[in-house]
Structure formats: C-alpha cells, structure tokens
Amino acid sequence: MNSLHDDLLTAQAAGYPTGGYSPALQCIFTSKDGGTTYDYSSDPTATTSKLIYVQQTQEKYGDSGVILLQNNDRSVPTDLTGYYVDLGWGLNTASGLKYGTAPRMWVMHQGDISGGPKNAKREIYTQFSMVGVWGCVLNTQPVKLPSSPSTTIPLYRYDESNYIWGIMGKTIYDVLEYLIETTLSIQTGLAFTLDALGTQDDGQISTVVPFPADGDLLRHINADSPWYFQTYGDLIISLLKLTKCVLVPRAGLAFKIVYPQASDEADETYYSSVADGHPFYEVEHRRLNMSPNHIEIFGGLDEVTGLPTVSGHWFDTDHYSGWVSPAETATYTGDFMPVQALGATNGELWETGFQSDAECRTRAAELGWQLKDQILGTRVVVPMDARVEPYDRVRIEDSI
C-alpha cells in the first residue's frame, strides 16, 4: 500500500471541495540518462494541459499503459520511444496538488492520429503505448549469470561440478535478490531493488534452496538452449511456484514480496456511504468452482524406468471429508466431482529435484493454496485511490 499525504486521503474519500473531485496527474517523460524531460502533467487549476487520456493496467505478471496527448500545435517530439514515464495519480486538495506514485512504464510505440467529424475542425492527437517492468524488462531480458567471477554469458550449460556462479546455496529469496539487484541491474543499467522480506515469509521462500551445492537442482536455467533462452520473468515465476508468494513491482524500480493470507488485516476499506469513509460506486462478488480439487505431485526420477520415485497429495477439504495430510486417499463428499491434477514430465507437477514424499506434499499444498486463492473474487469500482497496489487486501463494507 502506498503512503499518501493526509489531505490526499481526505480528498479521495470526501472530495475537495467536499462532494467533488479534481483529478491531477503527474505525467513526465524522461530520457534514459535523465537529462531530457517533457512534462505533460494535468493540473485541474489550469487550462493548458495537453493530456487527454491515461490508462495504467497492473496484473500479476504483466503491465501496460496508454497516454493520449492533444497535439494540434505539433509541439510533441516525434520520437519519445524508449523514454520512461513515472505517473503520479492525484487530486487537488486543501494543501494543493498531491500525488501517489506508480510503477515505471516505458514508451514502446508512438503514433499520431489526425481527423475529426465531417465538416468539423480537424484535431491531431499523439498516442503512446507503454509497457511496465514485467513486459518491458522481466519478460524480455534473457537470463545472464556469471559463469566465473569475471565473465558474464547466457548460461546454457553448467561447468563440470554443476556450479552456477552467484546463486548456488542461496534460498529462493536470496536468489531473487541477487537476480534483481545484481545481474539484472548490471544487464540493464538500471538500479532495481528488492525490499526486505520482513513479515511476508511463507516459510518456503526463506528456507528452500533451489540450487543446492550438493544434491539435485530444483530448477534449471536455460535448459532448452540454444533453441530458447529463459527470461528473468520465466526464472522468477518458476522460483515463486515453489512458494506461496508473489513479486510485486513498486515505484522507483523497486520490487516487494507479498505472501497473501486470509488472516491479513485489510489495507483499504471501501464503503457504500461516503459518510463512513472512502466510497465505492459498484461492487461485484464472484465465486468459482474448485477444479481440480485433488493434486498429486511427483518427485525424483528413476534412471532405469524413467518413473518418479516419490509423491505427495493434497485434497481440498471442502470436497473431501476427513482428509488429513499425509494420507494418500480421501472420500469425495462435495457437490461437484473428483478432479485430479497429476504430475507430468513437461509440467510443474513433476519436480524431479524433490527427493522425499514430504517435499512433494509441501509442493502439492502450495499449489492447492494458489487454487483456493482464486475461488473468491471481487470487482470494485471506486473514486481514485492512489494507495492501492497489487495484492493489497481490500475490505468492502456494504450497508445496502
């Protein structure tokens, strides 16, 4: 959750002046070296803004945005591709314009649109399509790790001792920190950071070692090279699948780890009445059927038979009565039907690096938790709230 000025919090909930909202938006295009900027911010107290429309979308592993400028005077530079934009979403408040911050986006496409209704004045608009850190960086940059202290190459094979420089023996969190703050920062020239884990520890991200110095690796890097090289996004997502955590981009090239739990306190609360606090316009609650409701994870690999050597189960106790781990069978008593997800060599349900049933059971429980997390969903439309970040916990107080 973003920290906001008290006057902005008040204006978001009750409006300023009371009962009305005066949107303000910081919109500054900046060159890579920071030496050139173009300010197209929107000020509700002025009439000179060129900003017509802005949209920023943040998803679990994706992000994008659109900016539309009025350009009748053709003053907008013809090529701002590659520039980055740090948006500030805000309002006019009792103490002037105040803003919250948003994750960075980069301009990937720029185009001019000229036209208008028949027999009406023609207008010229410039549109920018932008991509955030997932689409622009993590899902495009190939993984490069030092194969020695002095050489950085695309890693598609390990040395004779199966050693991967920089990440061997580290926990999942420490690997993520190294990837983000060291190799990715060197590769891009940008100073990315990962917030300290703090209270967002699921017990796995701080203990599981995916690249142990001794024993089988839980993950491989660029195993399909030279036909395909993993991106940082590929590797990071594969590591997070060993946990109950997600990675969330923040403003200022920062990332944080979030471990969502039902016991979390609400970060924001929205009310049906503005008298109670920040109001909502509309809310919809949805529920999905649980399918699959039984997961079996395989581990290990018998070199002779090609079959797994260990396994572990998870059953949804809303569908199966009386199941207690580590039992491998359960009686289905739900209102749907048994649906089992089984491990396969080409999927995440067969972790050949696992060497015990207990490891498989833990992984099955993690996947089950992720599925249960998707059952309940809510869509809420509110007046602007610059506090919100992905995976904040939101509570709805509906007095209707």
Image (cartoon, rainbow, N blue to C red):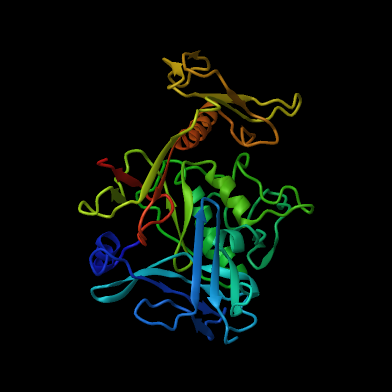
* In the rendered image, the vertical position of residue 65 relative to residue 362, given as above or below: below
Name the residue rendered at 54%, 76% in the picture. 69
Q: In the rendered view, does 234 fall on the left or right side of 1?
A: right
Q: Residue furthest left?
A: 275
Give how far across and how far down residue 110 sits, in percent: 64, 73
* In the rendered image, the vertical position of residue 74 relative to residue 147, given as above or below: below
The quadrant of the rendering that contains the N terminus is bottom left
Q: Looking at this view, is 74 or 233 the one in front?
A: 74
Q: In the rendered view, does 286 fall on the left or right side of 94?
A: right
Q: In the rendered view, does 231 fall on the left or right side of 386?
A: right
Give how far across and how far down residue 359 sits, in percent: 53, 31
Q: In the rendered view, does 217 fall on the left or right side of 60?
A: right
Q: Looking at this view, is 34 or 215 the one in front?
A: 34
Give how far across and how far down residue 318 sits, in percent: 43, 22
Give how far across and how far down residue 78 sits, in percent: 64, 82
Q: Residue furthest right?
A: 227
Q: Residue furthest front?
A: 119
* In the rendered image, the vertical position of residue 164 relative to residue 219, given as above or below: below
Q: Quadrant of residue 284?
A: top left
Residue 211 can be seen in this image: no
Residue 43 can be seen in this image: yes
The quadrant of the rendering that contains the C terminus is top left
Name the residue rendered at 66%, 26% in the picture. 308
Name the residue rendered at 60%, 54% in the picture. 233
Name the residue rendered at 74%, 27% in the picture. 306
